[in-house]
Image (cartoon, rainbow, N blue to C red):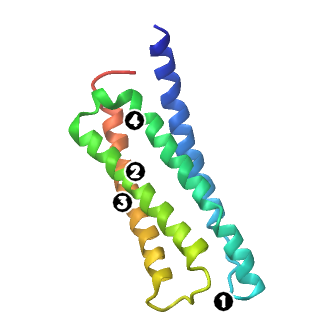
Amino acid sequence: MEMSRLKKAVVPIGMALVGLGCVSLLVLMSSSQWGPPGTEAYRIYEARNRLPPVSIMLMGIGLIGVYLPLRAGLGSLGRLAFASSLIGVVFMLAGNIAEFWFFTDQPYGQLNPRAIAWSAFLFGALVLLVGLMTFMVFVARRKQAP
C-alpha cells in the first residue's frame, strides 16, 4: 500500500520538474543581449547560457520520475517515446555544455565545433519535443494507474 502512494506522488513531482525545467529554460534563453566573443555583452550572454544545463537536467530527472512508476503500462512504443525524449535531453545538455564551456571563444557564423554544438542542442530540442509529446500521449493512455 505504501509503495502505491509513493508511486502516485512521484508522477506529479516528475511532471512538475519537466514543466519547471521547460519554463526556466525558456526564461534563461529569452535574453536579447548579445555581442561577439570577447566583448562585455558576450560575457553576460555566456554566463546566462551556462545556466540552462540545470534546467535541462531538471527535465531529464522529471522524465525519469514520470517514467519509472508507469513503465509497465506504457507498452513498447511508450518506452520508445520515453527513450527518444531522454536522448533529446542528452543532446541538448551536451550541445549547451560544449558550446558555452568548451568552444565559447570560437566565432559564430562559421563551421566549427561551436556550430556543431549548437546544432546538437537544436537537434536535441527537436527530438525532445517530438518524444515528449508522444510520451505524454502514452502516459495519458496507459493501461494501469500507478
Q: Which residue is mark 2?
A: 86
Q: Is residue 24 left or right of residue 127?
A: right
Q: Furthest-front residue in view?
A: 102
Q: In the picture shown, does residue 119 fall above or below 4? A: below
Mark 3: few/some/many CA within 10 Å (<14, 14-19, 20+) = many
Picture quadrant of residue 116:
bottom left
- Where residue 126 sits: x, y (%)? 39, 63
Q: Which residue is mark 1?
A: 36
- The answer to which of marks 1 and 3 sits earlier in the sequence is 1
- Where residue 17 sits: x, y (%)? 56, 41
Q: Which residue is pictured at 51% across the width and 19% down the height?
A: 6
Task: State the separation of the CA atoms marked 2 and 3.
Answer: 9 Å
Q: Which mark is residue 129?
A: none
Task: State the separation of the CA atoms marked 1 and 3.
Answer: 29 Å
Residue type, label 2: Leu
Mark 2: few/some/many CA within 10 Å (<14, 14-19, 20+) = many
- Where residue 91 sits: x, y (%)? 42, 62
Between residues 75 and 103, which one lies in front from this camera angle? 103
- The answer to which of marks 4 and 1 sits earlier in the sequence is 1
- The answer to which of marks 3 and 4 sits earlier in the sequence is 4
- The answer to which of marks 2 and 4 sits earlier in the sequence is 4
Q: In the picture shown, does residue 16 fall above or below 96? A: above
- The answer to which of marks 2 and 1 sits earlier in the sequence is 1
Q: Furthest-left residue in view?
A: 76
Q: Which residue is mark 3?
A: 127
Q: Which residue is mark 4?
A: 67
Mark 3 and mark 1 in contact (Cβ < 8 Å)?
Answer: no
Q: Which residue is pictured at 47% across the width and 35% down the height?
A: 65
